[in-house]
């Protein structure tokens, strides 16, 4: 057997021996009183594994002189921490997401950074509509940026399901504000407004003015402004009238848009219809997407085309022109913007036959 194998066996043996001491009276010299249970432990083991317990059990604190120490911590979470300290493992899947928050809290309290990292990775795999808001609150509280990013990305991809669930009511005010500030959290503005109203009802002691200031009233229809927002009495009539004026003008509105990096949002999976005529192709996207490049495919006839985008199919902005022959595929890049409609317009002297409803235009965010 190689030296490496011998070392591996030795490590395994030590872990097994340490495991035999876990929650056992044998050689125990301290007892933790947690809730209604007595948990035997070994000072030297805990001190060797954790700076917090080193200070508690061998420092100048009063507890260092006591045989029994009362702790005001969740029982199951504390048992999990002890299991980790003795056996260097923690079955997070067995513990479950709900109780993992308590474990994370204790890991943070005791300065167990490796354990915090393990919990971080576990929670990233367990994010769901039912728990994403609670996980986000914890991730923000304990400064876990990768988990925060994961939660916000999940929210962006599941916005309607999130708004229709009770989960969002558990969101902290600060996390909710950050969510509303994001241009790429695409959801009907009226649904966001309703969620804020319900959040205010559940948390009457919280100051919700900042949340309300982040509602983008001009993104609602006039009917929604008059029949949903106005009856609530939350906004002044002048605010509603100003929003209606902006809706009527229809330009420079603060749109929210979904970002799907390197996904063709003009494909049949993301477009609700594609209208092909002799002089143009118009594509209506299923929802507002943010894009910054458009390409036409090889089945376009040779000639010159203008690429245009719109939010309402009334006001069109040109994002570039392309001159195509049978051998080139040109990608037009432009400043990222929210888009509901894409139009490829034929410039004079060029005509083409109606094209199939897929594979003709590529539009995406790079």
Image: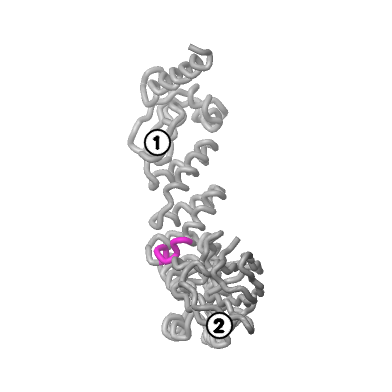
The residue under label 1 is 91
Place residue 347 in its image quadrant.
Answer: bottom right
The residue under label 2 is 279
Find the distance from the CA under tag 2 to the CA under tag 1.
63 Å
Q: Which quadrant is home to the C terminus?
A: bottom right
Please say whether residue 161 is one of the residues in the magenta stretch: yes
Label 1 secondary element:
loop
In this rendering, the answer to whether 77 lies above or below 200 is above
Camera-side residue: 189 or 233? 189
> How many residues crowd around disc 1 within 10 Å: few (fewer than 14), some, or many (20 or more)?
few
Q: Nearer the viewer, mark 2 or mark 1?
A: 2
Asked if labels 1 and 2 touch by Cβ distance under 8 angstroms, the answer is: no
Camera-side residue: 3 or 152? 3
In percent of width and height, residue 146 lies at: 55, 49
Q: Earlier in the sequence, mark 2 or mark 1?
A: 1
> How many residues crowd around disc 2 within 10 Å: few (fewer than 14), some, or many (20 or more)?
some
Boundaries of the magenta span: 157-163
In percent of width and height, residue 55 lies at: 55, 30
């Amino acid at each position: 057997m190689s030296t490496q194998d011998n070392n591996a066996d030795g490590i395994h043996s030590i872990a097994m021996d340490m495991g035999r001491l876990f929650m056992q009276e044998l050689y125990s010299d301290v007892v933790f009183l947690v809730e209604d249970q007595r948990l035997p432990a070994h000072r030297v083991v805990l001190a060797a594994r954790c700076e917090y317990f080193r200070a508690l059990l061998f420092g100048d604190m009063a507890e260092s002189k006591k045989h029994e120490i009362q702790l005001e911590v969740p029982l199951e979470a504390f048992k999990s921490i002890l299991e980790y300290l003795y056996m260097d493992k923690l079955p997070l899947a067995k513990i479950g997401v709900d109780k993992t928050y308590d474990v994370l809290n204790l890991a943070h309290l005791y300065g167990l950074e490796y354990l915090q990292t393990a919990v971080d990775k576990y929670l990233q795999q367990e994010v769901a509509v039912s728990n994403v808001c609670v996980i986000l609150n914890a991730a923000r509280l304990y400064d876990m940026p990768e988990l925060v990013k994961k939660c916000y990305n999940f929210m962006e991809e599941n916005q309607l399901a999130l708004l229709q669930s009770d989960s969002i009511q558990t969101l902290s005010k600060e996390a909710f504000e950050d969510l509303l500030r994001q241009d790429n959290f695409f959801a009907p503005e009226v649904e966001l407004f309703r969620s804020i109203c319900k959040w205010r009802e559940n948390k009457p002691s919280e100051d919700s003015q900042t949340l309300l200031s982040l509602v983008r009233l001009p993104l609602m229809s006039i009917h929604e402004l008059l029949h949903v927002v106005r009856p609530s009495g939350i906004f002044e009539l002048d605010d509603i009238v100003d929003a209606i004026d902006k809706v009527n003008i229809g330009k420079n509105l603060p749109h929210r848009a979904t970002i799907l990096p390197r996904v063709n949002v003009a494909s049949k999976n993301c477009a609700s219809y594609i209208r092909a005529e002799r002089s143009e192709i118009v594509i209506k996207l299923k929802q507002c997407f943010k894009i910054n490049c458009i390409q036409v495919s090889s089945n376009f006839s040779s000639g010159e085309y203008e690429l245009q985008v719109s939010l309402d199919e009334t006001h069109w902005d040109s994002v570039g022109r392309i001159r195509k022959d049978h051998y080139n595929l040109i990608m037009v890049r432009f400043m990222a913007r929210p888009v509901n409609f894409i139009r490829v317009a034929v410039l004079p002297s060029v005509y083409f036959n109606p094209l199939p409803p897929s594979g003709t235009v590529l539009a995406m965010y790079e």
